Image (spheres, grey):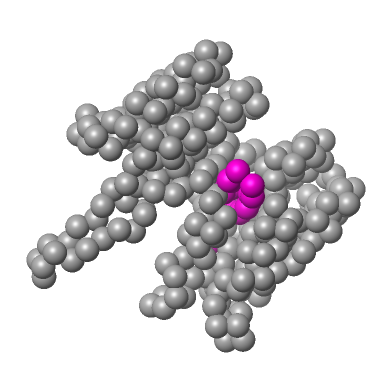
């Protein structure tokens, strides 16, 4: 039986975590969950939202499923997510974006994957105050990080039957930094002749995504553009409530929904577990449990097709009621 770290988060985290654990259990797959608490609920007792025991657990088990965690404002490190990415070198942020049944959006044929570099760019956080009227932020782009994220994108395309990997940049203006990213992409693309290469400027991409999102397959982007475009893409399929995500490195992988901890509805049995469930399905694919992943995915799709939804998607089911419908459809 495989042991996987479960960070059950805070806010709505414990509720949606329990739903997803129940669904996976009812699918017949046996997992030993190493449950770790994190976030605002543990600050008072342990002095930090991310205790060392959490990262130790992930290092031991290699794989984690993570519910949303609140980052305190005004103290501590910038973000629990950022800290995990840095500590575990989770250099690839993976965001599949695909239309789900019975969720009304402006588009019906979105099926793209965003691969975002996770470790550098402006998000490296290297800033300085020059004087009271001027601040500098340093944009870091390296060949090593650019090549490994591009290789990750091409490998993902090969393994998942994708046909095209499109590099997104602003290399016409930032000729050195984005130019280096694009040069790295071109070098890696030569190693994968079976995958069609494509290049686009980030502003043009945003325009085309809201006109014809079906034109895109796999997108690979530096950190800042990837952050912005991935939220745009989530809007194409129904919002953050159905947006899955993963942070993957050479040795470890953490799967998590894109949305936050929604403390305003904590404990009210209203939260939508779909994004965390989709993240768990991606996790099962990652560890080779493809049959169980497909079984759970089919049950989720059938449940949505039958019109069963939580309130955020226009339905009237509670968290537990929605989860029960999925379990019935297993």
Q: Quadrant of residue 20?
A: bottom right
- Give the residue furthest to the bottom: 44
Residue 245 magenta-highlighted: yes
Residue at 64% of width from left, 38% of height from top? 101
Percent position of residue 1, x then y? 88, 52
| Residue 112 falls left or right of residue 129 | right
| Residue 184 falls left or right of residue 319 | left
Percent position of residue 114, x then y? 49, 37
Percent position of residue 100, x then y? 62, 39
Q: Quadrant of residue 293?
A: top right
Q: Quadrant of residue 161?
A: top right
Q: The C terminus is located in which quarter?
A: top right
Residue at 80% of width from left, 39% of height from top? 289
- Give the residue furthest to the front: 144
Q: Nearer the viewer, residue 260 or 139?
A: 139
Residue at 52% of width from left, 30% of height from top? 151
Q: Nearer the viewer, residue 307 or 175?
A: 175
Percent position of residue 46, x then y? 60, 83
Res 107 visible: no
Above or below, comparing residue 229 to residue 78 in the picture: above
| Residue 177 falls left or right of residue 75 | left
Q: How many marks?
A: 0
Residue 36 magenta-highlighted: no
Residue at 22% of width from left, 63% of height from top? 128
Above or below, comparing residue 1 to residue 42 in the picture: above
Stretch of the chain drawn in magenta: 241-260
| Residue 104 falls left or right of residue 219 | right
Res 122 visible: yes
């Amino acid at each position: 039986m495989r042991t996987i770290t479960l960070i059950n988060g805070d806010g709505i985290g414990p509720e949606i975590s329990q739903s997803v654990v129940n669904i996976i259990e009812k699918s017949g797959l046996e997992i030993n969950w190493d449950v770790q608490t994190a976030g605002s609920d543990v600050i008072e007792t342990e002095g930090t939202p991310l205790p060392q025991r959490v990262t130790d657990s992930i290092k031991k088990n290699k794989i984690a499923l993570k519910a949303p965690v609140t980052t305190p404002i005004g103290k501590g490190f910038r973000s629990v997510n950022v800290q995990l990415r840095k500590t575990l070198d989770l250099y690839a942020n993976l965001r599949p974006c695909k239309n789900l049944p019975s969720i009304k959006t402006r588009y019906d044929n979105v099926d793209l994957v965003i691969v975002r570099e996770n470790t550098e760019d402006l998000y490296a956080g290297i800033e300085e105050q020059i004087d009271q009227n001027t601040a500098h932020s340093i944009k870091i782009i390296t060949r090593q990080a650019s090549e490994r994220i591009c290789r990750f994108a091409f490998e993902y395309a090969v393994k998942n039957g994708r046909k095209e990997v499109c590099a997104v940049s602003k290399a016409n203006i930032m000729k050195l930094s984005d130019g280096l990213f694009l040069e790295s992409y071109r070098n890696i693309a030569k190693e994968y002749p079976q995958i069609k290469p494509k290049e686009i400027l980030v502003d043009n991409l945003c325009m085309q995504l809201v006109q014809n999102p079906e034109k895109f397959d796999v997108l690979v982007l530096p950190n800042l553009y990837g952050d912005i475009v991935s939220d745009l893409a989530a809007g194409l399929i129904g919002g953050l409530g159905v947006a899955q995500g993963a942070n993957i490195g050479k040795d470890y992988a953490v799967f998590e929904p894109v949305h936050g901890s929604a403390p305003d509805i904590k404990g009210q049995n209203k939260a939508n577990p779909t994004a965390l469930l989709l993240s768990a399905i991606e996790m099962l694919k990652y560890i080779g449990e493809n049959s169980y992943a497909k079984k759970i995915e089919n049950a989720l799709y059938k449940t949505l097709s039958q019109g069963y939804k939580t309130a955020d998607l226009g339905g009237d089911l509670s968290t537990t009621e929605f989860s029960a419908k999925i379990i019935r459809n297993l």
